Image (cartoon, rainbow, N blue to C red):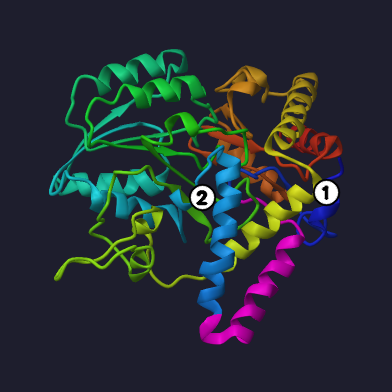
Amino acid sequence: MDFKRHFSRTIGRSGAPLHFAAHSHHPWPDVTFEAQQRCWLDASELLDRKWSHIFGAVVPKAQAHVSKRLGLSDPSKIVFSPNTHALLMRLLSATPGLPKFNVLSTDSEFHSFTRQIDRLREDDLVNLVRVPTEPFATFKDRFIAELQGNDEWDIVWLSHVFFNSGWTVPYADLVDIIAAIEGHTTFAVVDGYHAFMAIPLDISAIANRAFYIAGGYKYAMTGEGACFMHCPPGYGDRPRDTGWYAEFGALEQARKGQVAFGTDASRFSGATFDPSGLYRLNAVMDWLDGLGVDVAAMDNHCLDLQRCFLKRLDAADIALSSRLLRVRDVTACGRFLTFRTDEAERIDRELGKRDVIVDHRGNALRVGFGIYQDERDVDRLVAALRDVG
């Protein structure tokens, strides 16, 4: 299917760069332009009544879309936030571990988690254990062994797809890890940002035990401001970091002197926000539904491009090749391929001079794939790589 024509305002416009960084910033499809305008028009026409429309129509529709893509049946367990950092802070404020947290995680978590936890650790507010993700083949066993060495973890946090390698924790392994958590009050949290809308998901097997955090900035093609969290029942009933929207879902009045909270995912809500991201999210999901395109179809399209790229790359007989992949099996990683090379910074820089966008993290060169690409784009990328040496 020709997806590129649906990106005429972004990657399909004349003079647009060759974009292979969908894992970092995904171009927006054309349908988001009208959605952005609709948000403005609703605000100007409804004025103070716009929030009734947003919470009565826009948010429930977005919850239903997200729940469908996660294989869940209860949209009320989805809460939205402008960014994942705000959700992290509310989770931290809701755990019973204050004033000091026992945290088990990995050495490959994204900055929104890593930076915050490291800062808390500087002030001796966190006991942190990080399990190396590599070697990947033994990750599950090593993580579970560390997990079961302590039944007093406050938070267990790990990614579904790791941002610095692309490696995906097999879903069966993820289920086993969550099941191995012995503490009944431990918050289990899965960062799914590089998995949501990139690989087919059904998290129903862990839905009653784990939080699942993701957002629309990457593969959901929605842009900023549409992050979300699936919230299992019975965990974090009263976050200390709270906003006034968290009271909207309260089914009965709180006791005198006690702050009221909703009993669904709204308990993790914040306060006033820019709703345009949710308008764009709904537009993208409606567009895909209208095309009859699901995540599996998009994943297959990108897998075909990845295989094509590696075949062309190896045939080009240049320094960068499949031998440098951190994850050799494309079906075991997300929407991007990561090459370990000391030339990562130089290659990234030189490609940028040629209006080709990839990115790097240290010695890891990342090349991301999106539905807006085709084999001609792959050929152009390989030619540019051959040119930079």
Q: Is residue 316 magenta?
A: no
Outermost residue, front side:
252
Position of 141 compared to 274: left or right? left
- Tell me where residue 68 appears, x and y as whole percent: 60, 43
Q: Is residue 277 visible?
A: no
- Majority secondary structure of the magenta segment? helix
Identify residue type, mark 1: Lys
Secondary structure under badge 2? helix
Task: Name the foreground residue: 134 vs 41.
Answer: 41
Q: Is residue 13 visible?
A: yes
- Tell me where residue 212 appears, x and y as whole percent: 44, 41
Crowding around mark 1 (Cα neighbors within 10 Å: few <14, some 14 to 19, many 20+) is: some
Q: Residue at x 31, y 54 (%)?
A: 89
The magenta-colored residue range is: 25-49
Crowding around mark 2 (Cα neighbors within 10 Å: few <14, some 14 to 19, many 20+) is: many
Q: Quadrant of residue 295?
A: top right
Q: Is residue 42 magenta?
A: yes
Q: Residue at x 53, y 26 (%)?
A: 167
Q: Quadrant of the N terminus?
A: top right
Say which mark, if any, is on residue 75: 2
Identify residue type, mark 2: Pro
Task: Name the foreground residue: 355 vs 44.
Answer: 44
- Tell me where residue 177 appears, x and y as whole percent: 37, 23
Report which residue position mark 1 lands on: 4
Real-space CA distance between mark 1 and mark 2, rounded to the nearest whole angstrom: 31 Å
Q: Residue at x 54, y 54 (%)?
A: 63
Secondary structure under badge 1? helix
